[in-house]
Amino acid sequence: MRKVIITGALSVILAGNVLAQTPVYLDETKPVEARIEDALNRMTLEEKVAITHAQSKFCSPGVARLGIPEFWMTDGPHGIRPEVLWDEWDQAGWTNDSCVAFPALTCLAATWDPEVSMLYGKSIGEEARYRNKTVLLAPGVNIYRTPLNGRNFEYMGEDPYLAGRMVVPYVRGVQQNGVAACVKHYALNNQEVNRHTTNVIVDDRALYEIYLPAFKAAVQEGKAWSIMGSYNLYKDQHGCHNQYLLNDILKGEWGFDGVVVSDWGGVHNTEEAIHNGLDLEFGSWTNGLSNGASNAYDNYYLAQPYLKLIKEGKVGTKELDDKVRRILRLAYRTTMDRNRPYGALCSEAHIAAARHIAEEGIVLLQNKNNTLPIDLGKVKKIAVIGENAVKMMTVGGGSSSLKVKYELSPLDGIKKRVGKRAEVVYARGYVGDPSGEYNGVKSGQNLEDKRSPEELIAEAVQVAKECDYVIFIGGLNKSAHQDCEDSDRKDIALSYGQDAVISALAKANKNLVVVNISGNAVAMPWVKEVPSIVQAWYLGTESGNAIASILMGDVNPSGKLPFTFPVALNDVGAHKLGEYPGVPRNDGSKIVDEKYNEGIFVGYRWAEKNKITPLFPFGHGLSYTTFAYGTPVASSKTITADGNIQVSLTVKNTGAVAGKEIVQLYIGDEKASVPRPVKELKGFQKVELLPGEEKEVVFTITDNDLKFFDAAAHAWKAEPGKFKAYIAASATDVRSTVTFEYK
Ligand code: BGC
């Protein structure tokens, strides 16, 4: 018998009774899983296949016939990307798609404040919602393994615990807007060079202890609704269709019920895409685009090739139904949720949030002779020197590039803050990269300067000599081989001759402040010559205001480093022991194998194991005030399985201004059957204190904080014996320790 399903408006008219006839998939009184099954049962095979792949650069179809909306994706992670043409990367030319640029995720991590991360997620989620996006392709939590990685600025640093604590509120904040977060790039995408061909070889301990925890936290605690597979390979399979990472770990061990979205062009094989955990294919570079096929998207791996395999009976529909259920679940969580808020774009609240995040994340690295803050009552003339004082940083860097409502440069921010109280003069100092364009978005700046380095230094030195203060603003930028997607840096040193400029300025004026704008550690051969150094990240729309308020002391700096600044590349495990950037296979394939020989010893774990003194350690950051740490007290000397102990201490502001201190808890296993780091971050708290004020900080240590991943047993394990809790102001500034026993 032929079955006719009457849906939508027609059914309502026929029945004359709206409520009685509302189909289950549209009935909000029914459980979501029942609605998913109902929608699934109404879909044709063709509709099911269609919903698993893109129909344009950033959009995939819903089910038009049933009123299930299209899915609109957007980058991420620092603001909402401008609209591009349907089938090209060029700008669509809309005039209503400018956004607020929030600070880069390295800055967010440097705040060490989960509440700030919630504010970030909520604000960017509102911008995404206002722009009618279903999925925000963010945040990124790939671990900082080498300072050469061109995309470190989009991630949250070197420590899995810090990244895990900071990613969860971001995801929740975004998703409370009815916009899905898409956590990326899962997993082991730790460099840009050879990003499509690198096959990572890493032991299970490093995988579970270092590279996966932030993703796990985003999925299990943040309840992320989608995740993006990575470009690289692991165990010879690409991250976007990887049996081990996607099926076994993500969907198996972690119980992920959301959608696995491919990275753009990260799918390579239909059978693997069907069976190895991918749900939604985007950005594949099919020949159809250049060969003029009627619809290139039909050539996607999960399009006609998939349909053909099903029709020929070569694969069943079990996997397809699983993918479609997940994609429908995404619809119910986002576009089909009638209670979804409306969002807002470029609101005053978002601009204030961007500034607050920036001010909380800027790190005061060094401040000899209290050179900072600058007391405007005592200076007449300030020199600002360097290209990054004027260069727009929101244009460039790859997919995170933005079209902003505005970006206040550091120079303009300083001028605005100083006002008439002093004179501000600018000199270029060096010429880096005068260009400023990404996918048709132009900075509109003319930064061409044909003068020689000698002429530029001579001018800068002259200006520096005439001023009371010199603020050099340099670092990296968003061009290829700096902080930029699709290429890695070539070296840890600053480019464009900046080291020579800084050294010359240090000789010319003792009141020198170097502001380094970057998402990566840079070498500082002049560190002893320069009194004050500020790490300022890519700060987005409110960059100039935030930098000025830190330099003038309106805001007391309180950020701390989310990654180690090594003195030299050889001080990094990936370079000393690892095989960065990989070893090409001599088998005709393009695959480049890369063994992570340093294993779990990444960042400070490597430095401490090898007794290497960093330039600036993980967790380091100064303040304009001082803090005294009291003696910690433990609630017990022993901890048992499933038990916990509290370690409490007082922290007092002993200086003259209000400030915030990030108190860190690290734990070390005194004796273990496997190699373990000297200590690992297991807790932190940012405390705000008025001058003279004292607060109690309490850390709870559970047996989970004592565990390592036992690869043979494939389980987390704590071994009985002595452990040490380190209360510290940074990885190298330990204020006291408490020893306890695990029984
Ligand atoms: C990047 C992703 C991004 C996607 C879409 C890819 O090249 O790796 O992070 O979300 O493009 O723009």
Image: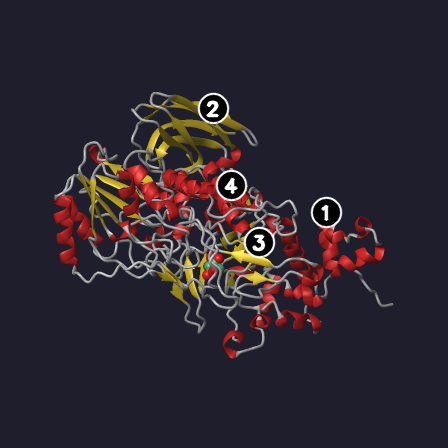
Which residue matches tag 2?
637
Of labels 2 and 4, the one closer to you: 4
Q: Which residue is mark 1?
A: 28
Badge 1 vs badge 2, beta-carbon distance below 8 Å: no
Of all residues shown, which one is farthest toward the front? 420
- The label on residue 345 is none
**Badge 1 or badge 2: first in the primary sequence:** 1
Judge from the rendering whether residue 270 lies leftward or rightward of residue 428; answer left or right.
right
- Using residue 35 as the reference point, say whether residue 639 is left or right of it: left
Q: Which residue is mark 4?
A: 169
Label 3 Cα crowd, 10 Å radius (few <14 / some 14-19 / many 20+): many
Position of 556 relative to 487 (above/below): above
Name the element at disc 3: loop
Number of numbered discs on residues: 4
Q: Which label's residue is closer to the chain start, 2 or 4?
A: 4
Cα–Cα gap, marks 2 and 3: 50 Å
Residue 55: x %, y % from top left: 58, 66
Mark 1 vs mark 4: in front:
1
697 or 471: nearer the eye? 471
Residue 198's place in the image compared with 719, above or below, is: below
Tell me the distance, in whole angstroms, between the alpha carbons under discs 3 and 4.
19 Å
**Amino acid type, residue under disc 3 in the picture:** Thr
